[in-house]
Image (cartoon, grey):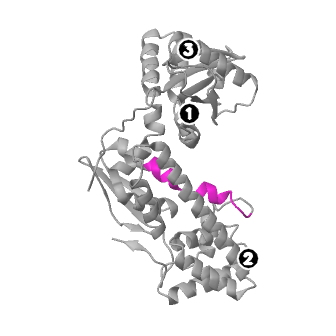
Amino acid sequence: MAELPTAVTDNTPRTFYALYTYHTNSLSVISCSLDTEKETDLRKFIAKKLARGTVYSGSGNVTAVDFPLIEDSSTPLECYYCLIRQGVDLETVDQTPPEEGFYCRECVVCFISPADGSLDLFRPELDKFSDSLLPLLEEQHRLEFENKIDKLTDVNQQLSKYLETWQDTAINYVCRCVQCLGQDIQYLIYAALMNNVVEFQGDQEPLKTDLKKFIESCSLSDLLSSSGGDGKGSDSGSNQSAVLVDIIPGGQWLPQVLTVTVQNDACEIQTKTSTKFCEEWAKTLTNGEQKSAVFLKHVMDSFKLKAIQDMNSLKRLIQQAENDHYALYRAYVFLKNCGNGRILLHHASVEDHTVTSPETRDVLVALQEFINESGGLELLQT
């Protein structure tokens, strides 16, 4: 059982947030952690960015801050800003008061931190955090319209309290996961790369949320669906089953279920399966700066890039093997020696744009025969 880590602490300069309503090129502050003077500077700065018309709803931007926000003006800062558009409930539009802006308000959220690259590295997480503000924003907007001041004050306090957690929620989760699981983090990495089902049990909801985000951050699904081929990816279960080859000698590959129990201030993983590649990934995470989210994310992205490069190499060998038997042997050797063959072969077998012809399917079947005859691909299990 791995012990839960204590809260992640760092000595970096303060971070900030700001939340505005946006209407006809005008920004009005909802909540902000800056003093009045600095908030005014930030509002002018963001207004200029918005005026250029390059901001899109749901996808944040990161830019350098070119004016001082903290006493140490020599510390460079960067700002993430994102346009949030409150959706229209088409079922209730007829009942919505006719005043313009009631059900189509736009907001802008800003997060500011030292320019260490964290905002760009964790931009997908920040996008999701920004999107998670919508329920509170919609409730706030409704209470404003109904002039329910007491309830509105409570919602505003909830918004401010939630915004204060932006760095801890969207960035520092990687630190907590690595510190909690240590080398066992390799089993989560393997599950993420294989798209296995992960079931969480126990009563520690914050850590379960962190682990889910870590798994999602390690996944290759989005990258593989946009790399090579026609870029359409694989979203049909029937198509996958038609071309799936045996990865386990004597039987067809089936998705595994990884059970993670988080209870009594401890975390336990069952069905521990991994590869050399995942083991090395975990060692690099645990042997480095475990309190540095930037370091950990760089490691994660580097290993994901290596996996994509290996995947592309395997695809090229599979294509060459349609007309070259030696390329088939080289594909076999590559899978045996890369330390990640099981995962690569799985993805090559289920991607629609990889398996597009009978010749390619024949190559995969022949490749699997080589692998079965040699005892299968190396797998780490405990």
Is-magenta flag for residue 238?
A: no
Q: Secondary structure beneath disc 1?
A: loop
Q: Please, is residue 379 above or below residue 137 in the view?
A: below
* Identity, as a three-letter code, of the amino acid under mark 1: Ala
* 32 or 360: nearer the viewer: 32
| Image marks 1 and 2: residues in contact by CB distance under 8 Å | no
- C-alpha separation, residue under disc 3 versus residue under disc 1: 18 Å
Give the image location of residue 277, x and y in percent. Answer: 48, 67
Q: Does the image show residue 97?
A: no
Image coords of residue 127 (percent x, y): 57, 37
Q: Which residue is mark 1?
A: 115
Q: Which residues are magenta?
A: 212-229
Residue at 67%, 13% (x, y): give it: 99
User: Is 48 situated left or right of 89 in this image?
Assistant: right
Q: Which residue is mark 2?
A: 357
Asked if 44 appears above or below 83 in the picture, the reply is: above
Name the secondary structure under disc 2. Answer: loop
Locate residue 356: give its quadrant: bottom right
> Which residue type does callout 2 highlight?
Ser
Check residue 38 in the rendering and tell me which mark sits there, or answer none. 3
Residue in the foreground of this view, choosing between 67 and 212: 67
